[in-house]
Image (spheres, rainbow, N blue to C red):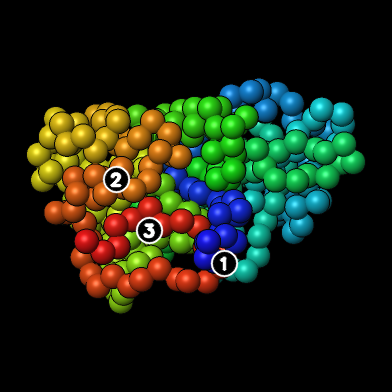
Amino acid sequence: MDAFVSINSSLSHGLAAELTVYGEEQSDLVSAALGWLTDGVAQAAMHNELNHLAPNHPAVSGGGYSHVRQCLQEPTPGSNWGFVSVCPQGSLDVLYNPYSPEVVPWLRSRIEEAPESAAVDIGGFSTDGETGNPIIRLSVSFDEELPNYVKLSYHVDEAMLTGTATARDEHMRLRTVVSWACMRYNVVFGHFSYERSGGATELERYLRGPARVPSRNTPQWRERLRGYSWLMVVSGDIAELLGGSEALQSSGAFDSVRILPNGSLLLQATPSFQQYRGEAVRAVRDAVRDVLAEGELRGPSPAPGQPPTHMVLFG
């Protein structure tokens, strides 16, 4: 086995389902972002994770805490920790507060300022009081170049999504939260990609030049797809260009085709993420290739530590 392949095969990588919400009014975007970080988090808490948040947390700070440790609850046996973080536009600062019902007014006021990003992390305390990796992580991001959009992201570790003991629950959690948001908000595009792409789709990551820039491609959701993936949302306009929901269902590329209230389609290629390999990837590419963003493709990086490629790069 190639040394790089051997190294990569033993690594786990972060994945994110990113949903692009379009809104004519800023209030629509604020509502979607705040709802995602409150009601969306509640949807993700399938095992009552919110009920197990340690109650003795510090008071919500109007200015926000500068270090996450300042806002964490005191660990108690079997309890969870939770915090919200906000990165204001044009600042290197990160503001923290404990995640609790009392934080919602503060979070709303920060979201109304369209921060670069905001996130909620929830996890369990270890026996020695350490935080460890989150069980639940949801985030939102705004882009000054895209004033009519907010992007909602659900984060999951690949090992949790594919592990024998955790795959079933994590697939259910992911689908529940994504479906909930798609039924509630004006989602015009969605993709499921490795986090190393920094919000770019895998296709954008392999394109050269301006075609690889997400902020350039995002407004083209009526005519072009930024990429394709195991779980994805295409706009109603794109669906029509591809022949509609029935044509996509009959293509054999998708295990599930769901029509959303705004006319977009929520597509899932295979029952599980583990099955999205080889011919399954090619089938999805072939089903949507006529509307994909165009540009010159570059080859994958040979460096170690890279996640697998779920794309047809050549052919």
Label 2 crowding class (10 Å Cα cut-off): few <14, some 14-19, many 20+? few
Residue at 70% across / 51% down in the picture?
96
Query: On residue 202, which mark appears?
Result: 3
Q: Between 19 and 229, which is closer to the camera in this rendering?
A: 229
Indicate the position of residue 285 as horizontal and vertical percent values.
Answer: 24, 50
Q: Nearer the viewer, mark 3 or mark 1?
A: 1
Circle 1 sits on which residue? Answer: 3
Q: Nearer the viewer, mark 2 or mark 3?
A: 2
Residue at 67% across / 56% down in the picture?
95
Which amino acid type is shown beneath numbered disc 2? Glu
Estimate the spatial distance between the alpha carbons at disc 1 and disc 2, rounded to whole Å: 25 Å
Asked if residue 182 lies left or right of residue 198, the reply is: left
Which amino acid type is shown beneath numbered disc 1? Ala
Indicate the position of residue 185 as horizontal and vertical percent values.
Answer: 36, 36
Query: On residue 279, which mark appears?
Result: 2
Label 3 crowding class (10 Å Cα cut-off): few <14, some 14-19, many 20+? many
